[in-house]
Image: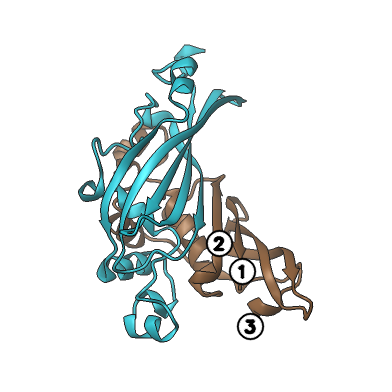
Chain colours: A cyan, B brown
């Protein structure tokens, strides 16, 4: 079990907090990230090619908002709970699932803010004990207040061996 | 074989995306690019204390490879949705294959693709599935 009881976690469901501030999407960072995921798409590396293809500027790779973890862009604590102290033990917690819904590509020149909502917590039996799931949904908006991308992350904590 | 996003059929396969012998330098490059400084991914001793044989590759790098497989094939602005589920551990030295299959297609009256669902799998060279996911595209 996490440090917090299920009742405590469930009481947090529906709460929304600001977690990301002024995430500025920069061409150098986009190119570095694209290179790290071994993308061959020249759009990520070449502003002229991107504009010729109809983009405002270089678009960012699909998972680029991961860089919101850098402290420069974070609000409050910079732990992996993203605004919510779930009490999960990092040694027994894994990233289960990640989902993105895009209104448009994240693009160089964007300055994004993010708010995160704890949308669900639940438990399931696992092979080594109870698994506790927490789903955190982060909505990224641009300088015009328009939603650019919604990110949904599921974290899973495995029950401690000595609590069984 | 070039798969045309505007003329998709269920069962069509995406071009295969491979990463051979994923080495420490590639892993570190991703950790620096993405800001993931969890010692599980760069500190063998820490990882062993946490019950692993050594460092493990972050799931989000494998998701990154899966996303690159999609956006190396279609323009990024046609991707509406991208989802990945982490089902296996990846370690330094593993070789990965990203495969994608068109699972559903909606076409207009002339047969052009309006939206499509792509099922995505990442497997190691040993045949273990480490990631399952899907993407929705509107070419």
The extreme front residue here reads A144
Return the disc, 1 or 3, that comes first in the chain's sequence.
Answer: 3
Height in image: B63 above or below A154? below
Q: Position of residue B97 (x, y in %)?
A: 56, 63
Q: Circle 1 sits on which residue?
A: B138
Q: Circle 3 sits on which residue?
A: B2
Q: Position of residue B35 (x, y in %)?
A: 29, 52
User: Residues under labels 2 and 1: Cα distance?
Assistant: 7 Å
Could you tell me if residue B128 is visible in this image?
yes
The extreme left residue here reads A72
The extreme top residue here reads A163
Which numbered disc, 1 or 3, marks the residue closer to the eye?
A: 1
User: Residues under labels 1 and 3: Cα distance?
Assistant: 18 Å
Pointer 3 indicates a residue of which chain?
Answer: B
Closer to us: B12 or B127: B12
Tell me, for residue B80, which label it has, or none.
2
Closer to us: B108 or B2: B108
Residue at 39% x, 40% y is: A116
Residue at 39% x, 26% y is: A86
């Amino acid at each position: 079990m996490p440090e917090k009881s299920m009742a405590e976690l469930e009481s947090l469901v529906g709460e929304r907090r600001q977690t990301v501030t002024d995430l500025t999407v920069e061409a150098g960072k986009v190119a570095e990230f694209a290179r790290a995921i071994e993308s061959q798409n020249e759009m990520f590396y070449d502003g002229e090619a991107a504009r010729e293809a109809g983009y405002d500027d270089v678009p960012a790779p699909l998972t680029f908002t991961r860089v919101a973890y850098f402290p420069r862009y974070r609000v409050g604590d910079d732990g992996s709970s993203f605004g919510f102290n779930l009490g999960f033990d990092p040694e027994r917690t894994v990233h289960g699932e990640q989902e993105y819904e895009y209104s448009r590509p994240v693009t160089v020149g964007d300055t994004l803010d993010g708010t995160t909502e704890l949308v669900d917590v639940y438990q399931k039996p696992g092979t080594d004990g109870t698994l506790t799931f927490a789903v955190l949904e982060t909505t990224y908006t641009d300088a015009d207040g328009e939603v650019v991308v919604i990110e949904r992350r599921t974290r899973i904590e495995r029950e401690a061996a000595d609590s069984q | 074989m070039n798969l045309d996003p505007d003329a998709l059929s269920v069962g069509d396969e995406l071009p295969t995306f491979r990463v051979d012998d994923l080495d420490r330098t590639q892993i570190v490059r991703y950790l620096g690019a993405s800001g993931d400084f969890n010692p599980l991914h760069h500190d063998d001793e820490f990882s062993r204390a946490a019950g692993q044989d050594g460092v493990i590759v972050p799931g989000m790098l494998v998701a990154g490879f899966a996303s690159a497989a999609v956006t190396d094939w279609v323009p990024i602005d046609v991707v509406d949705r991208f989802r990945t589920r982490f089902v296996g551990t990846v370690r330094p030295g593993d070789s990965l294959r990203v495969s994608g299959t068109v699972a559903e297609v909606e076409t207009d009256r002339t047969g052009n693709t309006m939206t499509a669902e792509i099922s995505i799998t990442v497997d190691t060279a040993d045949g273990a599935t480490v990631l399952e996911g899907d993407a929705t595209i509107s070419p």
